[in-house]
Image: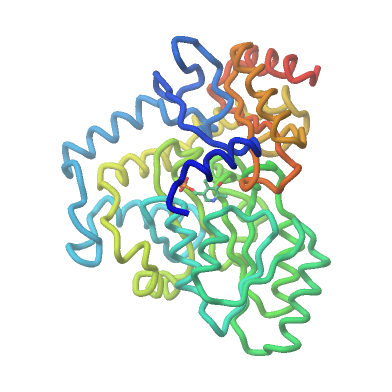
Amino acid sequence: MADPRQELADLASAGLLRTLRPLDSPAGPRVIREGRELWNFASNDYLGLAGHPALAEAFIEGIRRYGAGAAASRLVCGSLTPHRELEDALAAAKGCEAALTFPSGFATAAGSLPALAGKDDVLVLDKLCHASLIDGARLSGATVRVFPHNDVAKLEKLLEGIRGKQAKARVIVVTESVFSMDGDVCPLQEIVAAKERHGAMLFLDEAHAFGVIGPQGMGLAAREALQDHVEFQMGTLSKAAGLAGGYLATSAAWRDLLVNRARSFIYTTAAPPALAHASLAALELIRSAEGDGLRARLRENVSVISPGHESAIVPVLLGSNEAALEASRRLEEAGYLVPAIRYPTVPRGTARLRVSVSAAHPVAAAEELAGHLGLH
Ligand code: PMP
């Protein structure tokens, strides 16, 4: 089919067409779209750091010190000071020997899974893993098995079966701390126990937990004191850290293997060094008393929308694409930006609103939104 218009028409008639809509202000807690001011409950800026003056200042200082761009892949031109500093700080903060950064979280997942597993290996993914993990698993050429979302009994069965046939294979369980479209938390202790019973390793994507959960915001593995039992702790600097980029914290040997094998690391220009410099400032801020204060504010706002909820992502399930789109449109009319999430981001028939809460929202805005959502 040479003409894309038929495909676009098919998407539109299924309620699945996506279009880029303008945003005419910074992506802060209050945004301007097409002349209207809206409360932004759509971003991943859980602590409000994307607009934090100290990070903007660190970015500018980084540009003054290191220039605008990295100019080459890190293996070609050399590994710049801010990248090394950031990786050392991330490794220490995550309780690991080493860390490697990538230009995005997507590049981290899509590049590291194929570096860690190959055709004789098995990757065992939670059914609701993020697209970047799925794509990384597919690219790896490893056998990919899937267990129902957060179902540790089924995971255990799968691992038993795999070990029955492939006693020596490298087996890596892949899951997320906080699921990006459901906002729920994985049963980490049980998953660790299961993978250890079967000699498997664990790759944990902490994208939505980093900055939000655990002591000093260092994630779910830190909260459960299981850092030594999670071989690969992935995360992003693009959500609570307010910037962009991804990291994998692991042992020194695995990191060295990634440097040699992760194609999204090797064959791409390093992120701007100023970004790494700002990321270091973000990490410090997240771990500071100010970071604790922001997490307390975030928890207060989350509890207004969903009492007892652990993450900053609150889904409101509606089922049909049309119902989700209509609810999102109505909220926008009422002054709230809350995205409708549809297939293929979520399974068919589970379209929803995805409310992302931030410490930067005044509690009154969260209360009003809860009222509009019919939660009060
Ligand atoms: N993992 C998860 C669970 C995510 O939700 C996302 C972003 N939506 C990513 C990885 C990719 O991160 P980034 O936006 O930094 O590319």
The one nearer the camera, 218 or 106, is: 106
Given residues 82 and 367, the one toward you in this image is 367
168 to the left or right of 5: right
Quarter of the figure with residue 53: top left
User: Which residue occupies 68% across, 23% down?
Assistant: 326
Where residue 348 appears, x then y in whole percent? 72, 46
Task: Quadrant for residue 77, please give it.
Answer: bottom left
Check the image and report above or below for 293 versus 108.
above
Left or right: where does residue 162 sit relative to residue 117?
right
Give the total number of marks visible in the rendering: 0
Residue 245 screen position, x and y as percent: 40, 48
Residue drawn at point x = 26 percent, y = 56 percent: 269
Is residue 22 positioned above or below 34 on the image? below
Task: Give the percent coordinates (x, y) of residue 334.
Answer: 63, 11
Asked whether 36 or 240 is in front, the reply is 36
Say above or below: 351 vs 201.
Answer: above
Identify the image's colour scheme: rainbow, by chain, secondary structure or one colour.
rainbow
In the foreground, 338 or 297 = 338
Q: Position of residue 15 (x, y in %)?
A: 64, 35
Question: In percent of the image, x 20 and y 66: which residue is there?
Answer: 76
Instruction: Identify the residue at horizontal 55%, vertical 59% (top origin).
Output: 133
The answer to whether residue 133 is left or right of residue 147 is left
Give the quarter of the image for residue 365: top right
